[in-house]
Amino acid sequence: MRWITALLILLTAALACAEDASGPAITPISLAELAAKADVVALAQAKDTDYLLRREIPVSGSAYLKILIPYKMDQAADMVEVYEKGLHERECYFPNPTVFEEGRRYLLFLARDVEYPERYRGFPEGCALEVLVDSENRYALRYPVTGISLSDSLAGLAQPMTFSDGYAVVDDEELQPAQRAAMLDAGQIRQYQPGQWIYTTGIELARVRELMGPDLLFD
């Protein structure tokens, strides 16, 4: 988790400079709009990464994700390669699981790379929403939702959940103090053990699919 924390710190500084140089932040997008322009919409699991690292932070390279549920695919595939380069807002890097871990699960929105058609890229608004498994073995978006600048109002879809997924547990340093306080007040996390918190709220993936436009997607 240390590189994730370091990456967040570095990104905060980089984004402050980027806003001064490039103007306003990215305009949020709806799930339906994002799904309509994506070549791939799928529930997928991170399996491996091949990143160039600087100070233990990825700055370019590819991630490889296994397709669990294909909602929209421009061609049939069991795995997808997702390429990213540089540090910027809503970048598309993924943590690499160790040999002892399952990879994290994501709802992906990807575009085929025009320069290298065998791989995919993310969108300026983002490319992935983290998905957790609950105690009844159902998939749900972790709430609050992060990773993509969404215009959809999702608060009404969020509900209390008991997660059996190890990735529902976060360390103290992964949450800013103000963020942690706000989430505690909203009942979105509870203490798991000293120095750790667990998410308590999610959105069933079936409800999210409805927002993406069921006529567009397939099982």
Image (cartoon, helix red, strand yellow):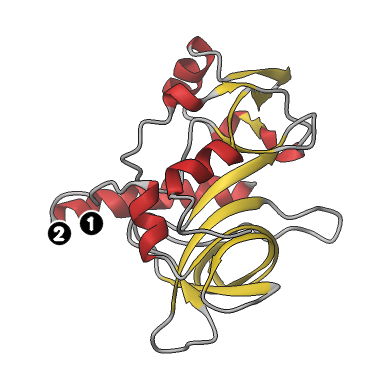
Q: Is residue 5 above or below residue 127?
A: above
- Identify which amino acid the numbered label 1 is placed on: Ala
Disc 2 element = helix
- Up-down: is 81 above or below 159? below
- Which residue does the numbered mark 1 point to in the structure image? 18
In percent of width and height, residue 15 lies at: 29, 52
Q: Quadrant of the C terminus?
A: bottom right
Tag of residue 137: none
* Residue beneath the point at 47% across and 62% down: 92
Left or right? Give the position of 130 relative to 165: left
Is 154 left or right of 45, judged from the image as shown? left
Q: Is residue 55 visible?
A: no
Mark 2 highlights which residue?
A: 21
Residue 70 falls in image quadrant: bottom right
Using a 10 Å C-alpha cutoff, classify the residue at mark 1 as few (fewer than 14 neighbours), some (14 to 19) or many (20 or more).
some
Q: Position of residue 104 (x, y in %)?
A: 68, 51
Neighbours of disc 2 within 10 Å: few (<14), some (14-19), many (20+): few
Q: Position of residue 33 (x, y in %)?
A: 33, 54
1 and 2 marks in contact (CB < 8 Å): yes
